[in-house]
Image: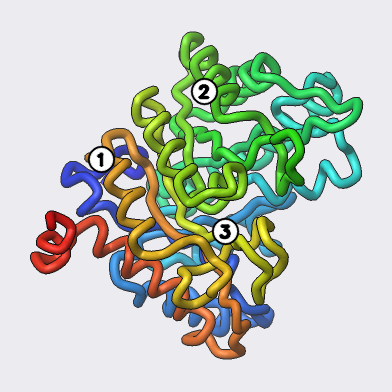
Amino acid sequence: MDSATTPSGGLRSMPLTLGAYAAQPALSADDVTERRWYQALAEIPGAGGIETFYRGTVHERGPEHLAGCLPDQWHVVITALPQAVAKITTTPHYGLASRDADGRREAVADVRHLLSEATRIDRFLGCRAVRAIELHSSPRRTGAVAADARSLALSLRELAAEAGEIPLVIEHCDALVAGQRPAKGFLSLEEECEAVAVAREHGAVIGQSVNWGRSALEGRSALTAIEHIRTLVAAGTLAGVMFSGAPHVRGPLGDAWEDVHNPLRQDDASSLLDEEQVHAAITAIGGGEGLLFLGAKVQDPRMSSDVAGRLAPLSRLVAAINTGIAPTNTDSERRSR
């Protein structure tokens, strides 16, 4: 299957993407331990790919090593957020949406290097395994730090010219809201839509994605992610949805409204995310036209020492997604009442 297209069967035939690095325990340096981790991921029903992160590299032993660990036929989604978060702690003007020329150029250069590693993954595997690169509208606009849609659009146009067939996707993080402590505080969804529209006018094929938890952080509500999904469906730019929870009170993973990848409420009472919310978001997605990835990224609030314990919350969230995509007759009857 061409990794850059939605499966012909729509959501029901789409292999799910696991943001498993959030749950991953510290792996020893030996290949056997690492491969066992990926084998455990492959046993999760419906899974068919990973979301991994870029922070200077996609893997400390190189992109080819990461590619060699993947189960057969799995795809890869790469998020550049950890790189952006790390950089803005020391260089506040860093980011693709920065109005500071040096800060924007540095961010563009980092994504160029990320694209080179993505190309190496595809070359090693002999197919288009990299389904998307997730980019972000940093920096946070505070004090003298300025960011806008025009700067983001300029960055996207420059990068799209070099990305080739690798899709670029703007993942929405919580926007800066007056009177509210931000987790990320990047551009608003509307500004990101504006930047994507401008980039597309110049031939760049770029989409947008929603992380359930990050949208909930912005709106302080379980309804915000659905609103964001509907906005992008209407705009024709929805390319991905990842499910993470959001804590509305302090819990085992941290304070309220922190971006800590909470699991379902049944595994973490502080989380806003439950199975009903998962199903509502999937309904908002609709047929999934243009969707490149759908998946889950959660931590284990118990920080279990064994692999099975670490993956249990992720597996339960994936099961909820699977049920939402292909509900049983009982589920369908219950929803219609």
Residue shown at the point (24%, 64%) measured from the top left = 323
- In terms of image quadrants, where is residue 306? bottom right
Indicate which disc, 3 or 2, sits on the residue closer to the N terminus.
2
Which residue position holds label 1? 286
Q: Is residue 134 left or right of residue 278?
A: right
* Numbered disc total: 3
User: Is residue 17 shown above or below 205?
Assistant: below
Amino acid at circle 1: Gly
Within 10 Å of disc 3 (Cα), the crowding (few <14, some 14-19, many 20+) is many
Task: Answer above or below: position of 244 versus 39.
Answer: above
Q: Looking at numbered disc 3 in the image, what kind of residue is underneath it?
A: Ala
Q: Would residue 202 be visible to someone looking at this image? A: yes
Neighbor class of circle 1 (other Cα within 10 Å; few <14, some 14-19, many 20+) is: some
Which numbered mark, 3 or 1, is in the foreground of this view?
3
Distance (Cα) linking label 3 and label 1: 23 Å
Q: Amino acid at mark 2?
A: Cys
Residue carrying label 2: 193
Q: Residue at x 40, y 44 (%)?
A: 128
Between residues 298 and 45, which one lies in front from this camera angle? 298
Colour convention: rainbow
